[in-house]
Amino acid sequence: MADGKVLIIEDSASLALGYSAQLSEAGYDATWVGNLAEAREAMHAAEFDAALLDLQLPDGDGLSLLENRPANAPSFIVVTADGSLNRAITAMRSGAFDFLVKPVGGTRLLSTVEAAVANKKRKVEVEPVKARSDAGTFHGFIGQSPPMRSIYRTIEQVADSRAAVFVTGESGTGKEVTAEAIHLSSRRNNKAFVAINCGAIPENLLESELFGHVKGAFTGAVENRIGAAKAADGGTLFLDELCEMELKLQVKLLRFLQTGTIQRVGSAQAEPVDVRIVCATNRDPMREVAEGRFREDLFYRLNVIPIHLPPLRERGEDVLLLAERLSERIAREEGREDLKLSARSKAIIQSDPWPGNIRELQNVLRRAVVTASGSSIEIERGYPGAAPTRVLPFQQPEQPAVNDDVSLMPPTWADMSLAEIERHAIEAAISRCSGNVTKAASHLKVSASTLYRKMERWRAA
């Protein structure tokens, strides 16, 4: 049986009695009040672990309880109608633990209250551990510029909330590092952190990867499998490149967020899951919504705590600090601890706009360390292997349409695999863009992270 005191702040008697019955049956000590004045009086007379808070109350706005709550206040769970979803998000940013949309399912109600009660009790027992280990670092981040210090403060403030976090920023700015920092700063850090790249998994497999499947659900499903959401139960689920998710799956993700349950592919059984959602994209999510590629209701459900990562060119002296720390680490990994950045390299690093951000800087440094012939790290800009004078398939005159007769194919394509053709096309695009991977990705209509992953595989091969 559960244990904890819950305050129900709701002016609808029928809803309040329903909540009270479910909570009492689960073992909670539930108290019902119908307005703000009674709520303040109840919280003054007794200490509660959690509170269900309706925003529309007879004597005022429920948000006022959040804005003026005492230090020993309960973990507030806002219960709202669909029409006041934006106000619920405002409540989350004001310090609410979570929010539920009416009508509230019994499983969702109990799982949320359980998490809220546990959150209040943990706050009493222990203070969170601060994340900084030394000057200029924060849970995987390197940097001490004002924009980054602001992000560190935001992460610390929201770490223990259940609110979804939406991270935006250019490719290579550290969106997954942000998600990991949120997880490590939270009291969920003893549970799993699970990352799933929504742009790297085929549409027909993504639902199974996310929610799992049962044996025999589809061809190739030879055993039961839990998905990423279940694997992250109690911890954090990071959904990268979210705006590349197909609309049909967005509907199922929204249902998961609203109900707190998953349904494996091929199963009719709903399973409760308690995860903190952090998602990320390098696209403009508002533009994706406006152009119909991303559901507006899903965006508002996820964009409770927005975090925008600045590009490296806007981080001032962080770029040199990053370069020095990364070059030291890479040199150790490559067994070249004696290598140091030359003065020329430092000047180039500080003057370059780094369109690929930290990922591009890291790749350039690794290449310089691996190819270093002396005691200094000398970096060169541009992508090696993308020779401007190289004759590539699409640079030739237009050829007849391809059919079953391979003799009609361009001669340079005839003996090439699809992977080889793809590599030639990518290298040529990067060459045309003077080594700018982000610009090349834009021309090829793919994300820059996709090109960087392919380049890493080619380098490792």
Image: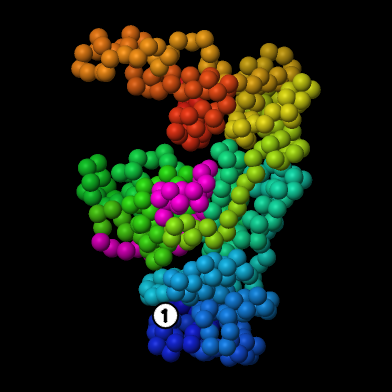
- The stretch in magenta equals 268-295
Where residue 389 appears, as percent x and y from the top left, is: 52, 10
Mark 1 residue type: Ala
- Colour pattern: rainbow
Say left or right for 135 vs 152: right
Residue at 47% across, 74% down? 80
Image side of residue 95 versus residue 200, left or right: right
Q: Is residue 434 left or right of residue 249?
A: right
Observer-nearest residue: 441 or 264? 441
Of residues 457 and 129, the one drawn nearer to the viewer in this rendering? 457
Residue receiving disc 1: 26
Q: In this orientation, which residue lies closer to the viewer: 23 or 143?
A: 143
Mark 1: secondary structure: loop
In the rendered structure, does residue 245 fall within the stretch colored magenta?
no
Decide whether residue 278 is among the magenta residues. Answer: yes
Q: Nearer the viewer, residue 358 or 186?
A: 358
Q: Residues within 10 Å of mark 1 (few under 14, many from 20)?
A: some
Where residue 381 sits in the image (x, y, percent)?
64, 21
The answer to whether 404 is drawn above or below residue 333 in the figure is: above
Which of the image's four quarters has the N terminus? bottom left
Residue 357: x, y in percent? 62, 35
